Amino acid sequence: MKLHEVKKRVLCGVLTLTMIFSSTSFQGITVKAALTGTQTTAAVHEGEYYTGVFAGRYGIDQLFDYVMSTSRLNSLPFDASWGTAYASTGHQLKTTTMEGRYFVLKYSGDSDYPIALCVYENDGTPVVAGRSKNLLTSSRIGKADNICLTTEAKTYMKKTYTDGIEGVMALCEMGKADQNGLYFSSSNGFGYYLSGNQGRDVGEKITWVNADTDVTMEKLAGLDKYSYNELSSGEYAVMYQANGESVRNMPEDQVKKQGVALTLSDKKPRRTGYRFKGWNTAEDGSGDTYAAGSAYTSNSVLTLYAVWERYYESGLFNVKLSKSQFFDNVTSANRINGLPYDASWGTANASTGHQFTESQVQDRYFLFRYSGDSSYPFALFMYEGDGTPVVASEAGNLSKWSEIGQSDNTCMTTSGKKYMTATYTDGYKGLVCQGKINKYDKNGVQFVSKNGFGYYVSCNRGYKKGDYIAWSGAVTSGITVDVMDSVDTFSDMEMLEGEYALNYNVNTTDEVTGMPDTQRKEDLYNSVLTMDEPQRSGYIFVGWNTKKDGTGKMYMPGARYEGEQSLTVYAIWEELDKSPLSLEENGTAAPKVYTLSNRTLISDALDASDDADAFYSALNQVTMTRYMDIKGGAGEDDVFSAKSSDESVVECSVEGSKLTMTGKTDGFAYVTVTDETSGQIVVVKLFCNICG
């Protein structure tokens, strides 16, 4: 076979593999893929504003040409990327144009026209005139010569977004907004109405509800009554609001179809320190109530707010107390006076027979709960070793007068009984008494029952009768339930006689993994601190310190502790000094637009070959695999990973700081490189066509 015939058979169209790189931290990108039910790429929801209206994806039944004078929806919107509204013939988008596409809003960076109205394919690819199908030849969507684009917007968007200006149809100024939608107009005179939570029909009249005409980007980013879902005509958004901070396990937004009943999500959110009671149409719980998993039948938008009940489970309420931590206390002498008293019956003024015996507390433990009664907010409970609440009538070895865990408990108030019955699985079973705390320090509390019995509760040490209580900076006022819930020096582990707690505190509200458990130190013996080191993204663990700010005594993992008292140490963190992530190829910084083509390699093989055999030999060496070096991050020991959004298009892997990408078939995918140590990412946008 002649060489020119080989060329004709093997050469094909231009193969272009375009990569656009963006380096940012995890905090700079919010991805709502789980909420939409389809893949939403990081390239869409990123930048300075990425929540509220900026986080949604909107269908053709949510964006309309809008006639302000009549407040009616006037059919499909107009392509404002060329010409003006005064000569708008041919500008109106068609249903076929928007098939398989959606709209998003971005911040443009131009204060005069801050809203960038953008168009995306359903796979997350931005629409660009000349590259995307079904656009008019005059369209300038996603192009640098878009008549709406300003210099400020071009500069900001190219610097800020992975997609730059791709997908931009119009730059707009805000008109007004309410909880249902917003009006904005393009720089060249086209008007738009965006329905944030409902799919609508042409001709519908928009009724504004307390419309805001002074709309800032911060307000748009804060709108929580806009759905993340793309909605069609006759569909209504059902949205769930956390109604509090640090809420986990939130259900996804749902879509209610006209005339069809919707079963609300049975997913129940969780929040540390609170109990979820249900959903309500009002933030303060004064509206209509809906239970998780109940039916919703109305043909209207629904916003539901989580209703929370304060629930205490930290600090004092996280302490499991053995018989060696719970005592009758002679306050005048500050000495342990033996086992505690059963305050469930009678009064302290007639206490004969009230003191627990050794057998009555053997293999049992105590703990505190919130009673729900502001006058006597602390409820003391008693449990069997297996967690079964003690009930006097069933226990067998309690005093015949005992009323522990029973409805006739002398030390239970009416409001306490009502709250505990409604709040706790076992209700008031196990209740010894309600009372107040009138003194506490870093080691324990002084508790007085409603009927006058006094106790010392050691949270960090196992005592014996006759031991002296040395209060350290004791607090005697302002002792509320919230204060006792926030104490971070109390142990979560039972201490036996002669044992001291070694408590480890995360010293941050961030997520921390690998935290060591509480240790026990035996009296007269030295103890070795755990070798376990906690992990926190973006930080290095420095060591343990007796003060939160690191000004106390420092302990390293494995250090020896020789003290004869409990010890609470706080994790000390040092923020990583991070450099922006970047990619290099052959020692040169990868350009913003990177072309990977086996066409070039094939041409080189042809130029270097004298005959067909030599060419085919060289052709066998042609590959769609490329290698890049990952630069930046926190340091040489950083751990990197890479993930492709579609492995049928491109496969990727990381070994050390070397990124490998292999094109598999024609298509589109995102490759995300993550610095697992510093939390930074690099997003690679990839279009793959394979010649061969």
Image (cartoon, rainbow, N blue to C red):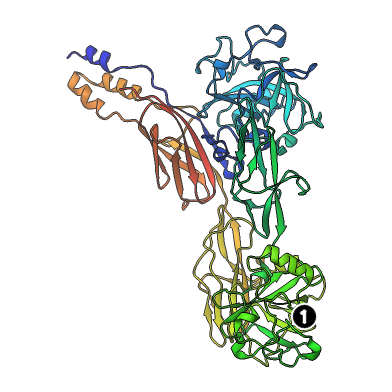
Q: Which quadrant of the view contains residue 334?
A: bottom right
Residue 222 seen in this snapshot: yes
51 displayed left or right of 668: right
- Measuring from the top left, give residue 629's x and y in whole percent: 43, 40
**Residue 196 location (% of width, % of height):** 68, 30
The percent position of residue 316, horizontal first and vertical second, equals 68, 71
Residue 640, image x, y percentages: 46, 47
Viewer-nearest residue: 337 or 111: 337
- Dividing the picture into quadrants, the one containing residue 361 is bottom right
Can residue 488 be seen at all in this image of the molecule?
no
Q: Residues within 10 Å of mark 1 (few under 14, many from 20)?
A: many
- Identify the residue at horizontal 56%, vertical 56% (top origin): 536
As drawn, is 32 to the left or to the right of 65? Answer: left
Find disc 1 in the rendering and name its residue. Answer: 448
User: Image quadrant for the C terminus?
Assistant: top left
Q: Residue at x 66, y 72 (%)?
A: 489
Above or below, comparing residue 145 to residue 388 in the picture = above
Q: Amino acid at mark 1?
A: Val
Residue 498's place in the image compared with 628, above or below, is below
Nearer the observer, 45 or 157: 45
Q: Quadrant of the N terminus?
A: top left
